[in-house]
């Protein structure tokens, strides 16, 4: 099994949705990084289910740090986070143990782990595991903030409703990081919520697109071939459940145009090199160019729906029909945005540590 990401700074995830606890181990952190309990809890709150647009499963996420922190600062040794699971309804899954839920990892998990996997609630594949990722990511986000690097994500579209585009990144990132439902236009946000509730009322679900911006990154970070900024970030982003596509800059919008429209012209501003546009999303040749890093993630509609679905019983090897019970999200996009921020912080922190050394983040 490969549950670790990162080279200089690494994160290992462990646990299952209905097990005793989930958790994470952060290794390679510089000693002396502040660990802000209030900020970690605030980040976990952004991932928490909210009202009719989320699952009815509510977890306290009462995390504990059991190693690697002393008197509010990292020690430089492995930092281990534990988050107990306290709201499991495991019986919801017993009756459908061998039915492959369409869009889920039930069958692929069975094929890989030969039936020994904990299948309840998706087990190790569950979005529940992202709570540990968010708690660990909060520490890295805090360290990056201290270096003037800011990360913000908004719901660019959901349920057929589009948010307005980024305009003033620094101001808008600060705004987004204060919101539970991360949109730049609140009226459109209400329309998105209505679309989610409408899908839920029909036993269905919706997806959408998350757009992320990172400001304050220096030029020169990343590698030209197999560890490009896009490659490292994509590796991390595709580990997040439901992410099915990643786009940097205006890739899909402008590929059918001409170079004269896609290229970003350079200019000098107060002795700094900048580009007139940012169609390439802040990266050239796999390396940051000093402009904001901008990318989008496609979030598929939540696969757990309450409509009858054609499937198979992979133990009996026969066709079947699945009708789900239990507690499920009609959309996870609003909860996923803080997860995207967290994996972005992990990938960026690792790239920076490889470039400047781990102590640079202190």
Image (cartoon, rainbow, N blue to C red):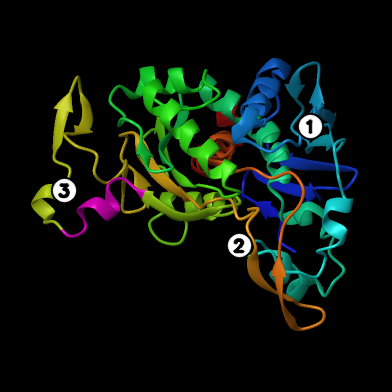
Residue shown at 51%/53% (left/top)?
Answer: 300
**Residue found at x 28% / y 25%:** 167
Q: Which mark is residue 329?
A: none
Q: Is residue 362 magenta?
A: no
Q: Which residue is mark 3?
A: 263
Q: Going from the N terminus, do you reach mark 3 or mark 1 first? A: 1
Secondary structure of the residue carrying tag 2 is loop
Write the residue at 75% across / 83% down. 318
Instruction: Name the N-terminal-most of marks 2 and 1.
Output: 1
What's the CA distance linking mark 3 and mark 2? Answer: 38 Å
Q: Residues within 10 Å of mark 2 (few under 14, many from 20)?
A: few
Occupied quadrant, residue 269:
top left
Asked if residue 11 lies left or right of residue 218, the reply is: right
Residue 244's place in the image compared with 213, above or below, is: below
Q: Quadrant of the C terminus?
A: top right
Q: Is residue 250 magenta?
A: yes
Vertical position of residue 72 compared to residue 354: above or below = above
Q: Quadrant of the N terminus?
A: bottom right
Q: Is 356 on the left-hand or right-hand side of 87? A: left
Q: Which mark is residue 103?
A: 2
Q: Nearest the camera: 207 or 244?
A: 207
> What is the C-alpha distance between the residues marked 2 and 1?
24 Å
Magenta region, residue range: 248-256
Alpha carbon of mark 3 to alpha carbon of mark 1: how far?
47 Å
* Residue 177, x across and y down, in percent: 51, 22
- The label on residue 59 is 1
Nearer to us: label 3 or label 2 = 2
Question: Could you say whether the residue bearing mark 3 is in a helix, strand or loop?
Answer: loop
Q: Secondary structure at mark 1?
A: loop
């Amino acid at each position: 099994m490969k549950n670790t990401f990162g080279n200089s700074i690494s994160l290992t995830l462990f646990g299952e949705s209905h097990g005793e606890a989930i958790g994470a181990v952060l290794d390679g952190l510089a000693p002396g990084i502040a660990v802000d309990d209030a900020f970690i809890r605030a980040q976990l709150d952004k991932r928490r289910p909210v009202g009719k647009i989320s699952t009815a499963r509510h977890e306290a996420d009462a995390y504990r740090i059991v190693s690697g922190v002393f008197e509010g600062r990292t020690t430089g040794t492995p930092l281990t986070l534990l988050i107990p699971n306290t709201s499991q309804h495991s019986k919801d899954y017993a009756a459908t143990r061998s039915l492959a839920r369409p869009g889920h990892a039930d069958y692929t998990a069975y094929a890989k782990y030969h039936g020994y996997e904990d299948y309840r609630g998706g087990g190790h594949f569950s979005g529940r595991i992202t709570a540990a990722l968010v708690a660990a990511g909060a520490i890295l986000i805090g360290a990056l903030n201290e270096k003037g690097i800011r990360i913000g994500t908004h719901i660019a579209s959901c349920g057929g409703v589009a948010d307005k585009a980024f305009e003033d990144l620094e101001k808008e990132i600060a705004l987004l990081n204060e919101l539970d439902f991360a949109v730049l236009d609140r009226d459109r946000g209400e329309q998105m919520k209505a679309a989610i509730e409408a899908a839920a009322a029909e036993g269905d679900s919706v997806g959408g697109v998350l757009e992320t911006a990172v400001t304050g990154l220096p030029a020169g970070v990343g590698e030209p071939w197999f560890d490009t900024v896009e490659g490292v970030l994509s590796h991390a982003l595709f580990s997040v459940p439901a992410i099915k596509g990643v786009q940097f800059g205006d890739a899909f919008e402008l590929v059918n145009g001409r170079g004269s429209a896609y290229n970003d012209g350079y200019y000098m501003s107060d002795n700094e090199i900048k580009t007139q546009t940012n169609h390439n999303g802040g990266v050239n040749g796999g390396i940051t160019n000093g402009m904001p890093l901008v990318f989008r993630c496609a979030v598929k509609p939540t696969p757990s729906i309450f409509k009858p679905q054609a499937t198979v019983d992979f133990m009996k090897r026969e066709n079947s029909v699945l009708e789900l019970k239990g507690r499920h999200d009609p959309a996870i996009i609003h909860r996923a945005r803080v997860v995207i921020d967290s994996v972005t912080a992990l990938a960026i922190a690792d790239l920076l540590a490889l470039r400047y050394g781990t102590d640079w983040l202190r």
